Amino acid sequence: MTSRFRRPRLLVLSAAALLLLIAFAGTVRAADPPAGAAITGPCTLTATSTGRSGEQLDTLTGPGTSDPNNPFDVDPKGSVAWAGTGPAITSGTYQLTIYGLPIWSGDVNNTEGKTSADGVLDLGDVLPIDVAGVVEVGGSISGTGGSCSGSAWIRLGGDPLTSIPGMVGIGAGILGLVGVLSAVPGRHPFRGLLFGLVLGLGGGILAVVFGVVPIGALSPLVALGGGGVIGLVLGFLPIGGSA
């Protein structure tokens, strides 16, 4: 009886250690240089982020190099003061997106033909839930007179453990881990695959919210696929009898 469950116990300890590494790997960071935004078109952008208590957090300039290893730090409950220049777009639309999902959009009404604009964006007004992690934000403006588009990596500060994505990641990680380990005794590859996908989802979310892995176009697929493969392989291991 003891030998039958010795290896699953080791798997539990190993998985717990991995989750702890994910949780603490992104907590210590050196001072970063100003962040950059990649811009396509005749536009420029500068931005300064401010925390919820009024303290300045970071600056961003564009055109520049958008680097996930040097993201623009913002407070989800703070604000971003921005200023930009570009062509005289008299009418059109603008929008900001996170992972392809629009978070802020509107119409351009520039009858005076101005080539510069500025403002302050309160992030609490555009982020419906408390989120944390490193994500790529895209932006565009187009209409009569020209167009510009760009992207920048943003690090959303806050407590990952109490954010909604963090809690979802922890729940999915625990559920997936328990399900994968239950598939080991007795060979249950399909159960392992199913819960492996859940484990991959949870691990991917935790990696993002703790800033270990910035979310890009393929990150969710890699996390899901990796977890599924792990669960499938463990489900084929000849450990124990039937379950």
Image (cartoon, helix red, strand yellow):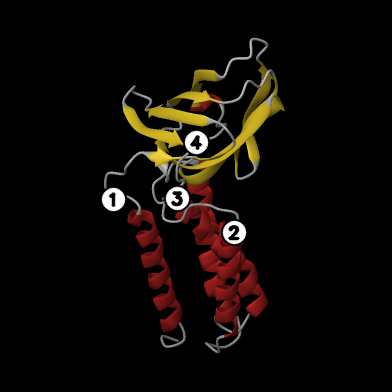
The residue at which mark 3 appears reads as 68
Q: CA distance from mark 3 to mark 1?
A: 16 Å
The residue at which mark 2 appears reads as 218
Dot 4 or dot 3: first in sequence order is: 3
The residue at which mark 4 appears reads as 130
**Disc 4: CA contacts within 10 A as few (<14), some (14-19) or many (>=20):** some
Which amino acid does the dot numbered 1 rest on? Val
Q: Is residue 19 left or right of 112 when viewed as pictured?
A: left
Q: Judging from the image, what secondary structure is the residue with disc 3 in?
A: loop
**What residue is rendered at 67% in x and 75% in y?**
190
| Image quadrant occupied by the C terminus | bottom right
Which amino acid does the dot numbered 4 rest on? Asp
Q: Judging from the image, what secondary structure is the residue with disc 1 in?
A: loop
Dot 2 or dot 3: first in sequence order is: 3
Which is more foreground, mark 2 or mark 3? 3
The residue at which mark 1 appears reads as 28
Dot 2 or dot 1: first in sequence order is: 1
Which amino acid does the dot numbered 3 rest on? Pro
**What residue is rendered at 35% in x and 39% in y?**
34
**What residue is rendered at 68% in x and 11% in y?**
111
Which is more foreground, mark 2 or mark 1? 2
Q: CA distance from mark 2 to mark 1?
A: 26 Å
Which amino acid does the dot numbered 2 rest on? Leu
Dot 4 or dot 1: first in sequence order is: 1
Task: Give how far across and how far down residue 29 sits, in percent.
Answer: 29, 49
Q: CA distance from mark 2 to mark 4?
A: 23 Å
Say if residue 138 shows up in the picture.
Answer: no
45 or 130: nearer the eye?
Answer: 45
Give the farthest residue toward the top.
112
